[in-house]
Image: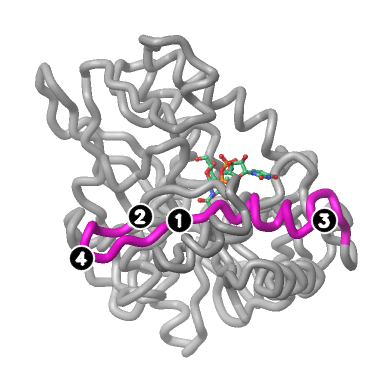
């Protein structure tokens, strides 16, 4: 296990903010993870965990040890005519997993194509796109305690998944490291095409491969490739508002896009943050070196590779403006690390 002091992390986060880890280590096996945890514990150093670095905003200096999890592996645990149970290492690339599963005839993940990042990061924010969330497939998540290295298995229910949220952002925040994720996938082609943009792009009875292709095409049209223009995907969550607030917004803005949310006894409405930002006039605008993407207003880009403060300053301006225009609070979506 190699511990590197003063490691530059600019190439390890897709927003490309300049950041330096006091110490850095990439762990490829469970033994290396345990060794790294013990190393930090002995020195009483704080620990930061990095996956693909695609949904994070890094502080300029990350104190203590920054641990990148590279644990590989795909293991077929069970197989029937209906479904498979697949265990995947936290370090596997998410999109490569989606491609591999489709090639094997393990269906379900097509709508989640091209989401950047690693498998281990996926349950933390319960990645979701085009009408499908990861929580639909998770059977179990295997973790190690950050403080004691003890193994803890969490069932789907234990993960407390909801929209862009899980126990790993709440009760177990900064307490467990995800090492493996077990998914149940279908061996019978099953497609989910309820999302309007996807429906428009497909014919009536599409195959999983057609859904995969359509999702890739839509994403490539709207979302900037972080290799070319640094970004970390959606910068804000789609806000959920009480039904009464939705109704009064609808009176002034009859075309406001919204989605059902919550239970019938407590009806709420999820709004499209991209639309609110767009309507508030931010699309394509720059502020202090950061920029609102011109094809999807929910994505902030960092073409000048400025530090986190520059991007967060633009985010704050947008939050104030959307609050003033619509009375809606926008919450940051990526994780802030080291602040
Ligand atoms: N819209 C605008 N202006 C824009 C972009 C979109 O008015 O600049 C409108 C669209 O017309 C549409 C609505 O806003 O009516 C929603 O747009 P879109 O379908 O592009 O999805 P989104 O709600 O903005 C969410 C996810 C994306 C995911 C897409 C597709 C969140 C925070 N974001 O975006 O996830 O790919 O749905 O399912 O939930 C990510 O998390 O990084 C991410 C890209």
Disc 3, disc 4: CB below 8 Å?
no
Could you tell me residue 266's position as x and y percent? Answer: 27, 65
| Front tag of 3 and 4 | 3
| Front tag of 2 and 4 | 2
Could you tell me residue 12's position as x and y percent? Answer: 66, 55
Disc 2, disc 4: CB below 8 Å?
no
Foreground residue among 153 and 307: 307
Q: Is residue 79 left or right of residue 146?
A: left
**Nearest to N terminus: mark 2 or mark 3:** 2
Q: Which residue is mark 1?
A: 270
Label 1 crowd bin: few (<14), some (14–19), many (20+), radius 10 Å? some
Query: Which residue is rendered at x = 30% and y = 16% of the image?
Result: 105
> Furthest-left residue in view?
80
Query: Which residue is rendered at x = 75% and y = 56% of the image?
Result: 16
In the depicted structure, whether residue 60 falls above or below residue 68: below
| Front tag of 1 and 3 | 1
| Mark 2 close to ligand 1, CB under 8 Å | no
Could you tell me residue 160's position as x and y percent? Answer: 25, 63
Helix, strand or loop at disc 3?
strand
Foreground residue among 38 and 247: 247
Structural distance between the alpha carbons of marks 3 and 4: 41 Å
**Nearest to N terminus: mark 2 or mark 1:** 2
Q: Which residue is mark 4?
A: 152
Q: Quadrant of residue 335?
A: bottom right
**Highlighted magenta segment, given as a residue range:** 262-286
Disc 1, disc 3: CB below 8 Å?
no
Q: Is residue 155 left or right of residue 22?
A: left
| Front tag of 4 and 1 | 1
> Furthest-front residue in view?
251
Q: Which residue is mark 3?
A: 291
Structural distance between the alpha carbons of marks 4 and 1: 33 Å
Q: Which residue is mark 2?
A: 261
């Amino acid at each position: 296990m190699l511990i590197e002091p003063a490691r530059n992390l600019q190439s390890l986060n897709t927003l490309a903010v300049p950041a330096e880890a006091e110490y850095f280590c990439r762990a490829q096996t469970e033994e290396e993870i345990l060794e790294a945890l013990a190393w930090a514990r002995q020195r009483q150093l704080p620990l930061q965990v990095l996956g693909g670095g695609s949904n994070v905003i890094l502080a300029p200096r990350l104190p203590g040890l920054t641990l990148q999890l590279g644990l590989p592996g795909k293991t077929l645990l069970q197989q029937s005519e209906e479904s498979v149970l697949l265990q995947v290492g936290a370090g596997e690339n998410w999109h490569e997993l989606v491609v591999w599963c489709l090639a094997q005839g393990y269906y379900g993940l097509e709508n989640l194509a091209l989401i950047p990042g690693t498998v281990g990061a996926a349950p933390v924010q319960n990645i979701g796109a085009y009408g499908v969330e990861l929580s639909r497939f998770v059977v179990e998540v295997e973790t190690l305690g950050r403080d004691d290295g003890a193994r803890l298995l969490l069932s789907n229910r234990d993960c407390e998944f909801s929209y862009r949220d899980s126990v790993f952002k709440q009760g177990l925040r900064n307490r467990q490291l995800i090492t493996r994720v077990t998914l149940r996938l279908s061996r019978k082609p099953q497609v989910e095409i309820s999302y309007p943009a996807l429906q428009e792009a497909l014919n009536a009875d599409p195959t999983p491969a057609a859904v995969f292709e359509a999702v890739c095409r839509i994403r490539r049209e709207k979302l900037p490739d972080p290799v070319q223009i640094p970004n970390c995907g959606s910068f804000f969550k789609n806000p959920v508002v009480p039904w009464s607030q939705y109704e009064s917004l609808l009176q002034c803005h009859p075309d406001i896009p919204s989605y059902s949310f919550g239970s019938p006894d407590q009806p709420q409405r999820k709004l499209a943050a991209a639309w609110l930002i767009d309507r508030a006039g931010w699309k394509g605008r720059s502020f202090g070196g950061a920029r609102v993407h011109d094809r999807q207003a929910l994505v902030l880009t960092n073409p000048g590779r400025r530090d986190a403060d520059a991007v967060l300053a633009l985010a704050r301006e947008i939050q104030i403006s959307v609050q003033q225009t619509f009375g809606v609070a926008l919450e940051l979506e990526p994780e802030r690390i080291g602040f």
